[in-house]
Amino acid sequence: MSIETIHRSCPTCEASCGLVMEVDREARQVISIKGDPDNHRSAGYVCAKSQAFRYIYEDPERLTKPVKKVGGQWQEISWEAALSETAQRLADIRDQHGKDAIAMYYGNPNGHNFSTQIYTQMFITLLNTERFFSAGSVDQQPKNLSCELMYGNGWVFPIPDIDHSDFFVCMGGNPMVSQGSLMSAPDIENRLKSLQARGGQIVVIDPRRTETADIADQHLFVRPGTDAFLLMAFVNELFATNRVTPGRLLDFTDGIDTLESLSAPYTPEAVAAITGVTAARLRQLVDDFCNASAPVLYGRIGLCTQQFGTLASWLVDVVNILTGRLDARGGAMFPRPATAHNDPASAPPELGYNRWQSKARGFPEYMSMLPASLMAEEMELQGEHQVRALITVAGNPVLSVPNGKRIHAAMANLDFVVAFDFYINETTSGADIIIPSTTQLEHSNYDFMFTSTCVRNFAQYSPQTFAPPPDALDQYQILNEVTARMNGMTGTDLEAIMLDGLIGQLLDNAPELSHLSVEDIKAKTAEHQGPERLLDIMLRAGPYGDKFSGDGLTLAQLKELPHGIDLGPLQPRLPELLATRDKRIDIVPEVITADIPRLQAALDKGPGDHMLLIGRRHIRDMNSWLHNLNNYARGKNRCTLLINPQDAERIGLTDSGKAKITSRVGEFEAEVAISDSIMPGVVSLPHGFGHTYRDTRQSVATTLTLGVSANDLVDDNEMDMPSGTSVVNGVPVAIVAA
């Protein structure tokens, strides 16, 4: 045995903690994975998910070769056969029935593979279908849309400067479990406790007393789906008490005066009944926030996945702007990633919204995507708009998208389904061909996405641990080959087009590089190939880069820094970061304010009398992912219906007993867990369970983490407008003892 030590970042969640690994390359074995004490960001901290990519690599049920369904049975086929048949069948369907006869779904695990993120854009561009769906419209799209409308770029996110804040208000998030979503912050527990140790406070506003609420100074129950009302009342109170203090933001922000009239109907008294938060408590929150020296308001997935997700996401930024806490130390600030992918030059030239509409019900696209809740309905259409083929990329919409049973049934009527995945799961089991990628241990990585959500700027390169098996391909190679073959090219041709395109874009937007040509940059980056070459170009052209000469960051340099590199604390970036046409913040975008009448109508209607269902997250879960890993599946049942004791007594439920939950679209039974951590009138089920489909190859998931799919209760007719995001929080349900 020859043991080597490897340093890398964890590819499982947004925190991207530093790891030190002991491996035997010859035996292709991982000996141990521990936190890297010398890592500049995490300083030795890791959570339970740090072992996940090892367990995935070792999972005997993971596919390592392509398979094809023949006579209802899976048979291994060659890589060449898989790529050729996939490309040919997709091309034939496109040529015979049009580009929109092909639908595509893109899953969350792609966020942890930088090469896939880069190459998917070329795949989507050349596929050119209007039927592109992703997990984004089941979680975060309202935040993307509100940021694009206000700042000009949907991937520019204000991140809490948590290390310098003294009053942290958390809505719709549970960073103690998520490790910080849109707030990439290793060891978030100690960061939050440090805030308290320096005299600060934490306030959690949530229908459930979450793990984060347990360590908070205050917790306010709020009725699911009503955060926009609460935030409107916050804005109302700021104007009513003359505490609108945007400071320097006023110099480049338009529309602040309009907010006073928009918020006028939403007094603390007017929203108290619908939110469940008393006027007195809301006013105290506003007082505490305004009296703190460095407060910040943070909202996350729970705000996005409700009936007014876009309004709620927008209002979080509105509050931070009105109080002068945007782009301010200890407030909400903008990271500066080393690849500059959130700089103004990276913004789309036009608003990617409503350029076309779904064939079913006419919903607007956003960022070239349609609402995932429409997947089944779009696939069921007949005639000229009929979907004939589906591509899934590292996603499991049957469990991750509302009314997944309907998606599963619709897939059976398609002419061709191909899945780029290494599991035969609830979705891929309905495919004709499955092409597996390498795992995280078999390719290098760079935390491309999450360097734009970090609480302190950093960069880290993660080397390949094991060489992939012969003929095995990474996800980007699969995408590249299929795209090329569909369009009469070779993979080499497509690589060249991508390289020239990236360099050309950089030269068009970087005057400081005007003395260089495309060929100059190619020559200076020839030591790297594929996605690493593209990464090197982005690093060198970025804000810390060497600009292809002199001193500065390069990929070669980063490879010599196994613990990553600290690029300093968050710094003010406005107004230079703005990518709007006039380089100003539009605080009252027309797309958003057009949704205000819908909010007013709901306020006039008042609270209903239904029980409301919300989701929840566990530290060992990643949606439907990780459930086939025995080490994470063991222990007591995590897929339980959380219910308040008052409701349990009224309905006649007992702890560990069974309840039948019914919505407009579905019903099932689940184990009951009674707790005062959930507010009365609300129940909670975790997301991503329901491994009840028997044609999968996930023996652990179908036994130890079986559970029920909360999405089978989620109404696919209910979406946030304007983003098209599924309403998975605040679902009306009826509950009886089973």
Image (cartoon, grey):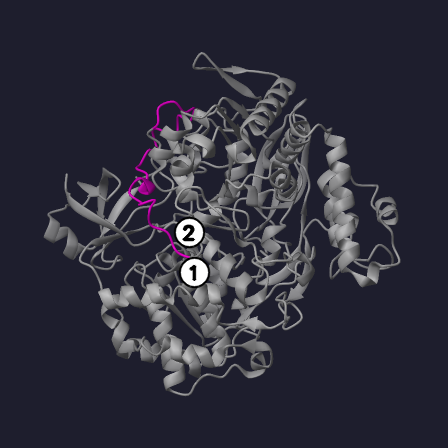
Q: Which residue is mark 1?
A: 310
**Residue 713 magenta:** yes
- Within the image, what quadrant is residue 292 found in? bottom left
Locate residue 371 relative to residue 100 in the image: left or right: left
Q: Where is residue 248 drawn, in percent x and y?
A: 59, 82
Choose the circle earlier in sequence order: 1 or 2.
1
Q: Quadrant of the N terminus?
A: top right
Q: Which mark is residue 443?
A: none
Q: Nearer the viewer, residue 667 or 458?
A: 667
Q: Is residue 120 above or below residue 698?
A: below
Q: Residue at x 38, y 64 (%)?
A: 215
The amino acid type of the residue labelled 2 equals Thr
Q: Nearer the viewer, residue 274 or 167?
A: 274
Q: Residue at x 26, y 41 (%)?
A: 665
Within-10-Å neighbours for mark 1: few <14, some 14–19, many 20+ = many
- Within the image, what quadrant is residue 91 found in? top right
Within-10-Å neighbours for mark 2: few <14, some 14–19, many 20+ = many
Q: Secondary structure at mark 2?
A: loop
Do the numbered discs 1 and 2 sit on residues whose CB atoms are within 8 Å?
Answer: yes
Q: Residue at x 36, y 81 (%)?
A: 237
Q: Residue at x 57, y 44 (%)?
A: 112
Q: Which residue is mark 2?
A: 725
Q: Is residue 128 visible?
A: yes
Q: Where is residue 168 drawn, in percent x and y?
A: 44, 70
Q: Nearer the viewer, residue 281 or 34?
A: 281
Q: Which residues lie in the magenta part? A: 693-721
Q: Quadrant of the C terminus?
A: top left
Q: Where is residue 713 drawn, in percent x and y?
A: 28, 43
